[in-house]
Image (cartoon, rainbow, N blue to C red):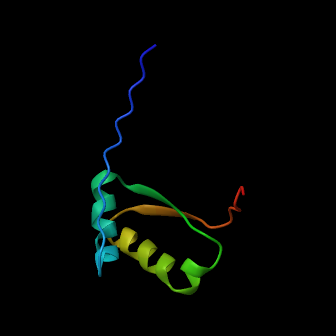
Amino acid sequence: MITTFYLPTKIIFGAGSLKQLGAEARELGQKAMLVTGRSSMRRTGVVDRVVQDLKNNGVDTLVSDKEVSNG
């Protein structure tokens, strides 16, 4: 049995790069799952900003912030 995985990676970083997330995600589809820790991303407002940007770009988002580490 032959199995092939092709996982191209695009990394965008730098000041203001978070603002591009919605447009980049929209190129990939209409749904996203955001997995984050329990508090710091919410407390700093990042989760709300990301979810709003995704929504503004037509991407429905499920936020998963209840996971615990396996370590």
Horizontal relation, residue 33 to residue 9: left or right = right
Q: Quadrant of the C terminus?
A: bottom right
Residue 4 sits in quarter: top left
Q: Nearer the viewer, residue 62 or 66?
A: 66
Name the outermost residue toward the bottom. Answer: 44
Name the outermost residue toward the top. Answer: 1
Relative to 15, does residue 9 appear above or below in the rendering? above
Relative to 48, does residue 35 appear above or below in the rendering? above
Horizontal relation, residue 64 to residue 31: left or right = right
Q: How many marks?
A: 0
Q: Nearer the viewer, residue 59 or 28?
A: 28
Q: Residue at x 28, y 71 (%)?
A: 20
Residue 68 percent across, percent down from the top left: 71, 62
Q: Residue at x 52, y 86 (%)?
A: 44
Q: Residue at x 63, y 79 (%)?
A: 39
Horizontal relation, residue 64 to residue 25: left or right = right
Residue 25 percent across, percent down from the top left: 33, 60
Residue 34 percent across, percent down from the top left: 51, 63
Residue 13 percent across, percent down from the top left: 31, 70
Residue 37 sits in quarter: bottom right
Relative to 9, does residue 64 appear above or below in the rendering? below
